[in-house]
């Protein structure tokens, strides 16, 4: 049995959840689960349909993106996952999808404004959209640069990766993460829901204001503050 | 066996209906059922997934929002439910969701205009949207103030809680109620449908007029008037 | 056994198809099936959930809207069905829904323009929207007047009821019909699809032209003309 | 047993996938599978519901659109399929649907701009929309001319049929193709997804730019270039 059995199982299950949660069709996404002690993660093999995934088919990759164990080729987005794990010690899982509404915001190259408490319960500001890369960076190691782009965009906006667990990559699609696979998947589904509510809100009231600061603070603190008590 | 077995069972079932009816994902909503003689209600425990709910896990709370029976923490929206029950003697159940279209109207901070007979069959005017609270009230007992906001907005608009059984809370989401859990759930689903039809109607005809008064009267009266005969 | 067993069975099945085909929620619609020799039709009883319907629960009504057989109250829309059957000898079934997109067009008080061959395969012109009634007519026998409104709107537009089998009633919702229950149901589902495609088409290209006449003729004739050969 | 058993089975299965994949309702589409050695293809019989299809019911047609084997009438779109197979030696299957979003773009008579990497992963430019035919051509052999229109529109735009495997026919609906039935079906589903994301993108940001050239090149090459490595 593999030394990496647990992350193989968790990553397999997380990938199988993607179509079940309505977040992907065909191969439009991937999930990975990390073991930070061993500095490796398990990720979806490239091109294999979700319903054919098994723990033993997961690919074990180190934080430089090199395959450690597994016969199949890892997802083409592997290097993006690798650089995020290398830089973010407390992230246990990463999910990448092309879910409909979050991807449409990414394609529109707009951050998602905070319009209501559904959004504020999860993050106290707009969901950031990292700009598209320069042509030079695109021609370099593209997937590695995508990860760097995510890391730098959070830094540029004074956001910690434990504070916000989701981002849009401009012209591309969303990435989410969390301490566990369940949390990273939850974040992908919540982001899709927030993205859908936000465009509807703008269509219903094109002049709508974003949520007032007192409500942002209240909702985020009741869920995430020192005296958190949230839970519907 | 609990003295509150019946409301435990009804509240459990009502909460389990929320995802089945497509009104919530994860923990985005809660339902409660009251026993006005005992001045208590049964409500969803905080953070427990809907499919793990059982009657014995429901929390029994009094009309001040204090737990009377149950080991789990009640929903963070409990005080909103409590103040509504205290003030509205004939309400047997309350449902709160973040359903997509109703929440988008709430975020857009607009009442839903009455555009057709689907709406008129249920209420003879716009579905009101209570404005967001003042910063001062938000910093106070927030969930209690949310309930007060709902009560006062109906009073300010000369609406009785038995006349209209649904409201949008601006920047937040809808609340609905009724004599029974089935009716409160029905109202949540009808509100979602009305909300969706209304934005589509405005998109198809941006200059559309609201329903003429004679049709509003006719449809509401055939369902709710003294000679009511409605029933498709 | 009832003399009307066959139309009871067909009407029961047609009503049960309404939620299965995604055209209604709760009691938002009704279907009826006629026996023109006996000058009666079987229609949904008022307020009974679709999944509780049985052939014996259907109500048999004559073409004046009077109950001939059955203990339950017939649908509140019964008189609309009755006047249509009385005037339209070759209509075997009528379906009324509040399906989302068709109802939104009705609420927007617009006929649905003909934008493509999906529409042209079914009717060679816009789907008409009858205007809302005058206040005077609304105060009269409302459901009877609704039927009259449908009949007169077709006449005013030189349309035969065998030529077009669907209409929107302004501020209200769609009605469809056909020789059989299957055809009337098919028409409701096709109308919903056409209605949805049409608003999307306008959103994608606000300046779009309606379908050119040569294509309208070609598509309608290959399905309905003397040399019809259509069938995907 | 038929000499054409394999393409009968594949075409039957491909047609049955159409409603399962959410691409058609009723008879709104058809799929065919070709045997280029025998210069024939198997196609859906006209007007038969998808769930009643069996391999033996498929109609075998030659590349002039003449029936070679089968008692049922072939789909009314048969001649469009025939001319495509005659001209495109490496196409093994063709799928035609009236799927919602792709058809709305066709009705809007617009090519689908390239707004993101989901699109770029499949084709490095806009999805073309062939203009509606002249009145003269419509009156001729309509389905044959539709095929010719598709072939000529690709040629006029310097596109090879192996380079792009999907097209919109203006005022009508999409056609897709591929080496296998699975690939042609995949292309129909991907096109529907791209079409839906594109209109949402324009609604979220009406002034959005199309994808920058460096990203178009990168994504298309990682999937289709000589050093292709794509696979999520």
Image: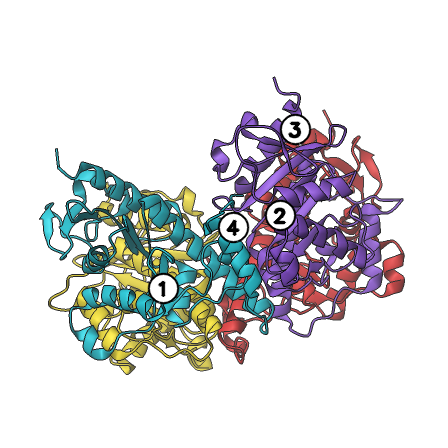
Chain colours: A purple, B red, C yellow, D cyan
- Of residue D206 and residue B60, the one placed in the foreground of this image is D206
Figure quadrant of residue C31: bottom left
For the residues beneath circles 3 and 2, the answer to whether they share a chain is no
The subunit carrying tag 4 is D
- For marks 3 and 4, give the CA distance: 28 Å
Residue at which label 4 appears: D222
Depth check, mark 3 against mark 4: the one in front is 4
Residue at which label 1 appears: D159
Residue at which label 3 appears: A7
Figure quadrant of residue B232: bottom left
Q: Kindly state the secondary structure of the residue where label 1 is placed.
A: loop
Report the disc number at residue B161.
none
Query: Which residue occupies 69% across, 53% down?
Result: A167
For the residues beneath circles 1 and 2, the answer to whether they share a chain is no
Left/right of residue D212 with respect to residue C197 in the rendered view? right
- For marks 3 and 2, give the CA distance: 30 Å
Depth check, mark 1 against mark 3: the one in front is 1
Q: Kindly state the secondary structure of the residue where label 2 is placed.
A: loop
For the residues beneath circles 3 and 4, the answer to whether they share a chain is no
Left/right of residue C214 with respect to residue B7 in the rendered view? left
Residue at which label 2 appears: B24
- For marks 1 and 2, give the CA distance: 46 Å
- Residue C200, position as x, y percentages in the image: 45, 68
For the residues beneath circles 1 and 3, the answer to whether they share a chain is no
């Amino acid at each position: 049995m593999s030394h990496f059995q647990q992350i193989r199982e968790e990553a397999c299950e997380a990938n199988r959840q993607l179509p079940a949660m309505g977040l992907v069709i065909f191969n439009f996404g991937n999930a990975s689960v990390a073991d930070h002690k061993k500095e490796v993660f398990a990720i979806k093999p490239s091109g294999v349909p979700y319903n054919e995934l098994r723990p033993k088919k997961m690919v074990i990759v180190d934080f430089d993106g090199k395959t450690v164990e597994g016969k199949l080729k890892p997802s083409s987005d592997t290097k993006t996952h690798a650089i995020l794990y290398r830089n973010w010690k407390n992230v246990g899982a990463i999910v990448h999808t092309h879910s409909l509404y979050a991807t449409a915001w990414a394609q529109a190259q707009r951050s998602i404004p905070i319009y209501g408490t559904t959004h504020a319960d999860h993050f106290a500001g707009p969901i950031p959209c990292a700009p598209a890369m320069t042509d030079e960076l695109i021609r370099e190691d593209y997937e590695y640069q995508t990860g760097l782009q995510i890391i730098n965009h959070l830094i540029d906006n004074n956001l910690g990766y434990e504070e916000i667990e989701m981002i849009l990559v401009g012209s591309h699609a969303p990435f989410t993460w969390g301490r566990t696979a369940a949390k990273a998947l939850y974040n992908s589904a919540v982001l899709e829901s927030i993205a859908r509510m936000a465009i509807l809100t703008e269509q219903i009231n094109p002049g709508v204001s974003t949520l007032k600061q007192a409500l942002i603070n209240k909702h985020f603190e009741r869920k995430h503050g020192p005296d958190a008590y949230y839970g519907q």
